[in-house]
Amino acid sequence: MTEMSSTATAPCVAAHHEPSWREGVRTGLPSLFGIGAWGLVVGIAMVKSGLTIPQSLGMTLVVFAGSAQLAALPLIAANAPIWVIFLTALVVNLRFVIFSALLAPHFSHLPWRQRLALGYVAGDMTVALFLQKYPSEAPQVGKLSYLKGLLYPNWASWQIGSIAGIFLGSAVPAEWALGFAGTLAIICVMIPLMAGRPALAGVLVAGAVSVLAHDLPYKLGLLAAVLVGMLTAMVIEETAEKWRSKRG
């Protein structure tokens, strides 16, 4: 009986709902300029790191993950083994596994191809905005339309900015040294996220490890820094939770 009622309610989630689509677009609108600017910087950084225009276009369209793209660029420039590049990008993007786990109960009834497409265009901010609107997993009219209203403009804004940066980067003189722009952009994105002791400790430890492991071959110091920083933040967060539970 539960299975039948779930099937019956699924169409109201998947069917297009124009008011929800428009609401999703309006909700995500304030972030689009920042997403486009971030894409612009990453596009310039890709070209200035030595990638050709076709390679840069392929990377932004296939990968669609600014932090992973920037993490991979120095490895590509250093001719690191492909497994190091893939592993680094995978570690940097592990947060999307969490996003998928959070979204899965809302859209598990959809065909896997559709879920795969939604996962490709998903982003940090869009997933967070969706979960603010729909914290409950219960089926509701317009859920999918609201999510698409967040995801599609976000994806388009990134790609427009990134592609513009790719062509702009090829025209900018090398002496402008805009390859460092990606690093500056990462810092601008990272600082607001350093809320709380676990995140701050993770960033500080990762920074220290990256400096100490700078001489490792194939930029493996970057991968080590990411892994140790993540583990540090997780340990501190878990320790803090245990301490709070004991006090409670």
Image (cartoon, rainbow, N blue to C red):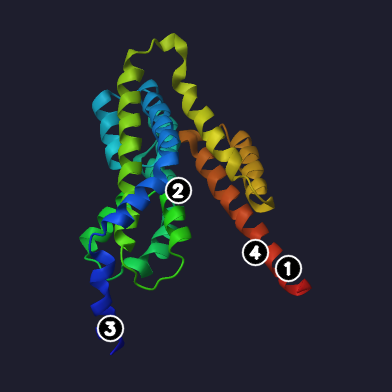
Question: The residue under label 1 is which amino acid type?
Answer: Arg
Q: Could you say which quadrant of the image residue 218 lies in?
A: top left
Q: Name the foreground residue: 179 vs 168.
A: 168
SS at badge 1: helix
Q: Could you say which quadrant of the image residue 78 lies in?
A: top left
Which residue position is annotated with label 4? 238
**Mark toward the start of the polypeptide (3 vs 4):** 3
Question: The residue under label 3 is which amino acid type?
Answer: Ser
Q: Nearer the viewer, mark 3 or mark 1?
A: 3
Calculate the distance from the C-alpha at mark 3 to the C-alpha at mark 1. Answer: 41 Å
Does the CB distance between marks 2 and 3 fall below 8 Å? no
Does the CB distance between marks 3 and 1 fall below 8 Å? no
SS at badge 4: helix
Q: Is 40 placed above or below 88 here?
A: above
Does the CB distance between marks 4 and 2 fall below 8 Å? no
Which residue position is annotated with label 2? 125
Q: Nearer the viewer, mark 3 or mark 4?
A: 3
Which residue position is annotated with label 1? 244
Q: Nearer the viewer, mark 1 or mark 4?
A: 1
Which residue position is annotated with label 3? 5
Q: Is 200 placed above or below 56 here?
A: below
Q: Nearer the viewer, mark 4 or mark 2?
A: 2
Does the CB distance between marks 3 and 4 fall below 8 Å? no
